[in-house]
Image (spheres, rainbow, N blue to C red):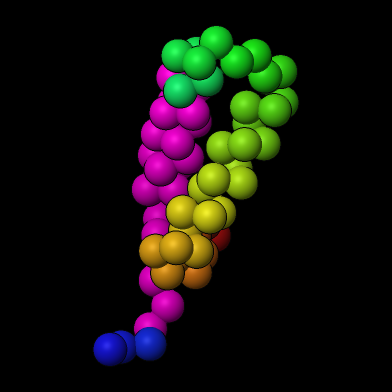
Amino acid sequence: MDNKELWISEETAQLILDAIAWSNKDWMDTLDWNFNQGGEVDNARVDFIRFCRARGIAGVERKVKI
């Protein structure tokens, strides 16, 4: 297997993060759990990092104009 690191675009990262946050909120609403807004964001970030590590995503590429 190739040992190249997998990098994703900033847009793809945002889409993954949004999907995780949406899924977490749906799950919490279904169970009638209340988290403060900061807690929802923190949970989504932690889950995003876990998702990336589990799938071998090493980082996010950001395009910058110079």
Relative to 38, 62 lies left or right: left
Magenta highlight: main SS: helix
| Above/below status of 65 relative to 29 | below
User: Range of the magenta residues?
Assistant: 4-26
| Above/below status of 5 relative to 56 | below
- Return the residue nearer the eye: 11 or 40: 40
Residue 39 visible from this viewpoint: yes
Give the image location of residue 6, x and y in percent: 39, 71
- Return the residue nearer the eye: 12 or 27: 27
Q: Residue at x 56, y 54 (%)?
A: 49
Q: Residue at x 71, y 18 (%)?
A: 36
| Above/below status of 27 relative to 52 | above
Residue 8 appears in which quarter of the rendering?
A: bottom left
- Return the residue nearer the eye: 61 or 64: 61
Query: Which quarter shows the N terminus?
Result: bottom left
Give the image location of residue 57, x and y in percent: 44, 65
Q: Residue at x 45, y 36 (%)?
A: 20
